[in-house]
Image: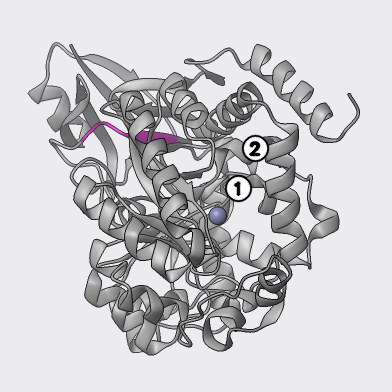
């Protein structure tokens, strides 16, 4: 059966905006995109849904998040400003106070929030693995769950590697066409170079997409470039020395072969011209997480320079523990405003604009995740991942230009409809795939346990 969605504006992203446009969906795929009259004529027996004063565009791609930490929204404010204490509290709270079921509920609530905000595809870095895959399957979202691996002590690299490999082998059976597995050596400062090499080779052999946090904090930079700082001190207390490469995080990843695997790198705040050149040359993806970086005081990635160099850049909310929302429209607005506040420009002295932001949200994210074969634009033959955003609310009226109205005036709360592979996962104000009321109660229970009140 064919269904046609019509709206005042259709924004295919790889093509110009279409006034009074339509998108036809057949099964899991997009069967046609164009002016309403044309699409209706091509599919005369299709069911037609009129979305009115709204924009239809490709589903938003959230390249970097940690859905299992959704229960920690607002939980870590006291630790902000001390990244080391922040990381320690995240890890300890997750490991000691959250059961596997809590992690599922937390991830499922994160998936509810994402679907409500028009996110159709997520790049999730997960320590728990199975609960997050289950949450994405239940919510009906598309995603890659990058299983995390840690191990700064090179003397135990072989054992850590075996653990990671076993975890991946166990999780393989949970893959579906929409939810697949990846591998995430956590970061250059928490994974010894020897272990990083082993994990990278494994990912390449197993055709697992690779994701890492990289060039995020000053502390990371101090450890990698000088072998000093807070992480070096902490590792010394644990009785081992980190094998520092004495170069930037990105150059380090190039030299151990990570960049050859076309990884997705979250953050890339501390990158210079040579680092950006390396990212572009290797076709590595960047998950730009401007709100998380700002909130944790890590600084701001050179967005315009990365785009100008032709790097593949998408947006990530990071976990809601450091954001505190998964709202990609808001993320794109923040990315743009922060870029302009810094006075960045691209060719010809042009500041980034709303069309650049919409591209980051969709095509850019899909490219960074290496998923352009499936999603990132409205084009015939691609998977039917789409979102409709209303444009007639008080805070959006008048809307002269749909791109500007979306990026500068709208938020995830204006989303009317979210469709993943042809399936409506959010419509009429409700997530259709999960019992939101039941999940809310269970999430609040988990939050009480996290806070130590139960
Ligand atoms: Zn992260």
Q: What residue do we see at 51% from left, 57% from top?
A: 332
Q: What residue do we see at 31% from left, 59% from top?
A: 200
Question: How far across and how far down the image is residue 154, in percent?
Answer: 49, 66
Q: Is mark 1 within 8 Å of ligand 1?
A: yes
Secondary element type, mark 2: helix
Q: Is residue 35 above or below residue 324?
A: above
The stretch in magenta equals 383-388
Could you say which is closer to the camera, residue 283 or residue 100? 100
Tell which residue pokes out farthest to the left in this image: 42
Q: CA distance from mark 2 to mark 1?
A: 7 Å
Q: Report which residue position mark 1 lands on.
A: 319
Image label count:
2
Question: How far across and how far down the image is residue 391, in percent?
Answer: 50, 40
Could you say which is closer to the camera, residue 2 or residue 55? 2
Q: Quadrant of ligand 1?
A: bottom right
Q: Point out the tag, 2 or 1, that comes first from the N-terminus.
A: 2
Name the quadrant of the N terminus. top left
Q: Report which residue position mark 2 lands on.
A: 70
Residue 286 in sight in this render: no
Q: Is residue 173 left or right of residue 71?
A: left
């Amino acid at each position: 059966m064919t269904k046609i969605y019509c709206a005042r504006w259709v924004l295919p992203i790889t093509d110009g905006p279409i006034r009074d446009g339509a998108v036809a969906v057949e099964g899991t795929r997009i069967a046609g995109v164009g002016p309403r009259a044309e699409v209706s004529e091509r599919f005369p027996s299709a069911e037609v849904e009129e979305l009115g004063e709204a924009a239809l565009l490709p589903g938003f791609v959230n390249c970097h998040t940690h859905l299992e930490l959704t229960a920690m929204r607002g939980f870590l404010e006291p630790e902000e400003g001390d990244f080391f204490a922040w990381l320690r509290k995240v890890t300890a709270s997750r490991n000691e106070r959250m059961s596997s079921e809590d992690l599922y509920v937390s991830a499922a609530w994160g998936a509810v929030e994402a679907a409500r905000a028009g996110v159709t595809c997520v790049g999730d870095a997960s320590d728990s693995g199975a609960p997050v895959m289950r949450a994405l399957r239940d919510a009906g979202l598309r995603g890659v769950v990058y299983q995390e691996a840690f191990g700064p002590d090179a003397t135990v690299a072989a054992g850590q590697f075996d653990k990671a490999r076993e975890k991946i082998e166990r999780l393989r059976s949970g893959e579906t066409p929409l939810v697949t597995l990846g591998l995430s050596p956590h970061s250059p400062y928490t994974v010894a170079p020897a272990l990083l090499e082993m994990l990278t080779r494994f990912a390449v052999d197993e055709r697992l997409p690779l994701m890492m946090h990289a060039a995020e904090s000053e502390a990371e930079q101090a450890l990698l470039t000088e072998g000093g700082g807070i992480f070096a001190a902490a590792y010394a207390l644990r009785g081992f020395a980190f094998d520092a490469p004495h170069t930037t995080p990105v150059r380090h990843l190039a030299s151990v072969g990570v960049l050859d695997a076309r990884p997705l790198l979250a953050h890339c705040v501390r990158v210079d011209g040579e680092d950006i050149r390396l990212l572009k040359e290797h076709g590595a993806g960047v998950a730009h997480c401007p709100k998380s970086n700002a909130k944790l005081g890590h600084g701001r990635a050179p967005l315009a320079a990365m785009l100008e160099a032709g790097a593949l850049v998408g947006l990530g909310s990071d976990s809601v523990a450091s954001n505190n929302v998964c709202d990609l429209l808001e993320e794109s607005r923040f990315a743009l405003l922060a870029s302009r506040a810094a006075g960045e420009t691209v060719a010809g002295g042009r500041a980034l604009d709303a069309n650049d932001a919409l591209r980051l949200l969709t095509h850019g994210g899909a490219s960074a995740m290496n998923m352009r074969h499936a999603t990132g634009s409205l084009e015939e033959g691609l998977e039917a991942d789409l979102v409709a955003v209303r444009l007639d609310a008080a805070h959006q009226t008048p809307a002269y230009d749909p791109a500007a109205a979306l990026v500068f005036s709208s938020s995830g709360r204006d989303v009317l409809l979210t469709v993943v592979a042809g399936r409506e996962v959010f419509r009429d104000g409700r997530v259709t795939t999960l019992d939101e009321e039941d999940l809310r109660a269970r999430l609040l229970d988990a939050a009480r346990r996290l806070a130590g009140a139960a």
